[in-house]
Amino acid sequence: MLQWRTVSIRALSKDWAEQMAYYRWLENPSVSLSSLTESLAEHCRHQVKGRHVLAISDTSEINLQAHAGRLKPEGLGVVGNNRDIGFFLHPTLIVDSTDGMPLGLSHVQLWTRPAERPSKAERHYKTQPIEEKESYKWIKAATGSDACLTLGAAEQVTYIGDSESDIYEPWVQIRPASGHLLIRACRDRLRYDKDVTLFSELSSQPSAGQYCLDVPAEPSINRIARSAQMTVRFTPVSLKRPTRLKDNYPEQVEVYAVEAFENAPPNGQKPVHWRLLTTHPVRTVQQALQIIQWYRWRWHIEQLFAILKQRGLDIEASENESIWAIEKLSLLALSVALQILQLMLGREQSNTSATLAFDAKQQRCLKQIAPTLNGRTAKQQNPHPTASLAWAAWMIARLGGWSGYRSQRPPGIVTFERGLQVFQGMFAGWLLAHP
């Protein structure tokens, strides 16, 4: 699968016998989810030495309702609407803090939600221990990543979560050596030392500076592309322990709050507005802007999900009949999606080695086919240093049908996926000629 960049068993197989062998392998109970997850973490471990990395976690659902009629009943659960069949996927993507380049996956969680379960009221959800809630996934993502990042000798780790992770418990439980947290706030919490709320305290702060933000278009939420003028504010805060938690949690946690908001959005447009909480010290506007940039790189995990699902590998169209097999296939597909994401983001990464996405033999093959991909004009020549990630991405995009002109729209998911499939066919022939 890693070679052919597809999750279709039929496309991977040379004949019916090989197709059946793939199915048997995925159904084999000896092939565990934990072993596949460990394989992903092992690859990631070799990329993090000496780096300050961002560990970005998020959840996506794999909806299999379209195949409900042929799926085996064992292990079936429901997704977010508590009706459609499927399971949840919660990976942790490791990103370099200096340039935002994805390095690997340190941890992946998978689970199903029972179709019949007590309501939140029946479960006394507010008083349930965090370990019994789905939201414990945020803490498990950090603790599960510790071994990978510690063995890999990462210099520092910042764990990043979206507004769903805005709960009190991670501030207490996720405090690994050299580790930090960065979470988008969605709850207007009480301050411990003042009779005011977090949002009120932030809004009372003076402007620390302004900057321009290029906002991309997003038709799904009716957002237009624009250059937004943003104002930045920040302040240290002491967050008060929620009343639902008992004395086994401290009465307060000390963090820094950063706010960035759009000054004058166009008519009919919702303003860009982020409130971020972090354990990193924020005493200058430069430090605040760094926090904002790190949080913005959380978008990479959304792109990873887009590649994994409809816009790319289409994991939800899998023809497997077992939920266990599709879960294993999803873990394998994540490694393929990661390579496509690295190429998309590495289009201009001339200082990053192609080794991040291609092994030594693949790079030798790329060097031999490189002259055949250059066009006749100077504008169609590969402009990047040989053996850089940008150099390799340029060639894969050309194989995928991109013209090479910078004036054209940059290559995207489909172009890179197609280019990788073409390259793998060429590489297979190259291996026959260079055993």
Image (cartoon, rainbow, N blue to C red):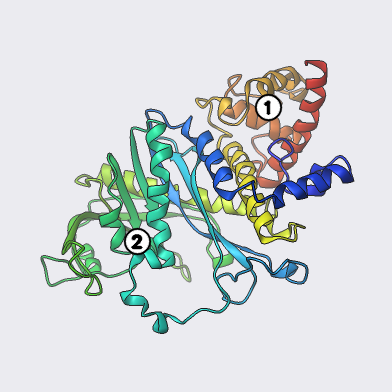
Q: Mark number for residue 263?
A: 2
Q: Inspect this view and state whether residue 97 appears.
A: no
Q: Quadrant of the N terminus?
A: top right
Give the amino acid type for the residue marked by disc 2 in the picture.
Asn
The quarter of the rendered structure image containing the C terminus is top right
Which quadrant of the figure has residue 314? bottom right
Front residue (pair 344, 204): 344
The front one of 171 and 345 is: 171
Does the image show residue 119?
yes
In the rendered image, which quarter is residue 198 located in? bottom left
- Residue at the top extreme of this rendering: 434
Residue 434 image offset from top left, x and y in percent? 78, 15
Q: How many marks?
A: 2
- Identity of the residue furthest to the left in this view: 193
Q: Residues within 10 Å of mark 2 (few under 14, many from 20)?
A: some
Task: Specify whether 307 is left or right of 147.
Answer: right
Instruction: Judge whether 155 appears above or below 1 on screen.
Output: above
Q: Left or right: where does residue 236 sit relative to residue 75?
A: left
Q: Which mark is residue 379?
A: 1
Question: SS class of the residue under badge 2?
Answer: loop
What residue appears at the point 51 percent right and 48 percent down from the top-left corner? Answer: 300
* Residue 204 percent location from the top left of the image: 18, 65
